[in-house]
Amino acid sequence: MSDSKPDNPVGRFVLKVLIWLPISFFIWYALAGPLLWPMQPLLELGFGMFSDLVEQVRMAHGRLLFETTLEAQVADGRTGLVTAEINALKYTYNLPLLVALLYAASDRHFSFKRLAAIYLLLLPFQIFGVTFDFLAQMLFHAGPEVAAQVGITGWGRELVALGYQFGYLMLPPISAAAIWFWMNKELVVELMDLEPDSSS
Amino acid sequence: MLRFFLWFLLIQGVLFTIEMQRAVQNAVIEPFTASLAWISSTLMKLFDKSIVAQGVIIRSLDHPFAVKIAAGCNGVEATIILFAALLAFPAPWKHKMWGFLLGFLAIHIANLARIITLFYIGQWNAEVFEWAHLYIWQALILLDVIIVWLIWVRKIPVQVTKQAAA
């Protein structure tokens, strides 16, 4: 089989990905603070534009803490403001994954400009995931009293549930795979030309 | 290529929305996930007699740690991504069917390895478990999808791929 040849491009690509993955994940984790920082003002801005649900977003190594304006009563009868903690790394691992995939595909991706570009390209998908995680926590896990204050009902709740699942399960891999494919179309074309007609 | 790309995005979105429907979860996804737990535990019992599977939960009689196979850990989303890529790419249907079958096997063999390794990593170290569960295995499963798709693309008859590349 041609795929077992040492010079086959798929094998070479996989080997390079496996070398780059631990390196990119290590750097991503070490730089998690600065890499996640832009999410904080962007989330505050986004929530501020559409609602007054979120008072402030704070960050502590890889976790975003949402301080909300929503009120909840605790067991002793006192009322407090609800907070939500989200592990933002769950939504941002597509960055080291994409870097490893790109570096393995071609040397031309070794550039700070490209790194900055893919960081910016992934950011909206990551913010989508975090936003729906927050909304899902408020609607489905913080109790009916809090859910009622959010003001999303009926189909809106279904959309939040779907958006949360999509943002967590699909968007991180899909965004990495789609951007990788789009930036490496010529690799796919090269692969297609290599194999002779073997279907007949 | 643009056509493939847009079809891929559309198909994966549609398949995922179908997967999320309660009726599909009850009739297909949950029994499938339980069968994964059963297969994993059966494999583990070959070398570890303390393993017990109850529905989608796998636990050990010797250790308090247990794993629950949930959405995202059953390989269904990875299968959706692969199937969307196979469906969207122009290729003969016979070729697509081989892709579905072999791709499904490749993803779920890797996923069984994920479940089994995570179970033992979890018994050993909670922090490493979180890393392996949330980031590393997610990346490896997507890599598996990409490898299968690239190998599949290489096997497409040349005259079809020339049209696709145009």
Image (cartoon, rainbow, N blue to C red):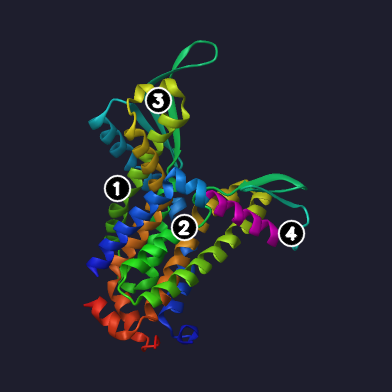
Residue at mark 2 to residue at mark 3: CA–CA distance: 36 Å
Residue B162, placed above or below residue B45: below
Mark 2–mark 1 Cα distance, whole angstroms, equals: 20 Å
Whichever of callouts 2 and 3 sits on the residue coming sooner in the sequence is: 2
Assess whether mark 3 and mark 2 are in contact (beta carbons under 8 angstroms).
no
Q: Are marks 3 and 1 in contact (CB under 8 Å)?
A: no
Q: Chain of mark 4?
A: B
Question: Which span of residues is magenta-colored?
Answer: B30-43
Residue A121, quarter of the rendered image: bottom left
Residue at mark 1: chain:
A
User: SS at mark 1?
Assistant: helix
Check if residue B39 falls in the magenta segment: yes
Crowd class of label 2 (few under 14; some 14 to 19; many from 20; radius 10 Å): many
- Rendered location of residue B21, percent (x, y): 42, 45
User: Which residue position is annotated with label 1?
Assistant: A124
Provide the secondary structure element on which disc 2 rests. Answer: helix
Above or below residue A135? Residue B48 is: below
Residue beneath disc 3: A147
- Picture coordinates of residue A108, whole percent (x, y): 30, 72
Amino acid tagged 4: Lys
Disc 1 from disc 4: Cα separation: 44 Å
Q: Nearer the viewer, residue A74 or B112?
A: B112
> What x and y, as percent, mark residue A85?
45, 34
Q: Mark 2 and mark 4 in contact (Cβ < 8 Å)?
A: no
Give the residue number, with chain letter if any, for mark 4. Answer: B45
Separation of marks 4 and 3 at Cα, in angstroms: 44 Å
Q: Work out how far the residue at label 4 is from the one at label 2, CA to CA, in angstroms.
A: 33 Å
Q: What residue is drawn where x is 30% and y is 73%?
A: B90
Q: Which residue is mark 2?
A: A25
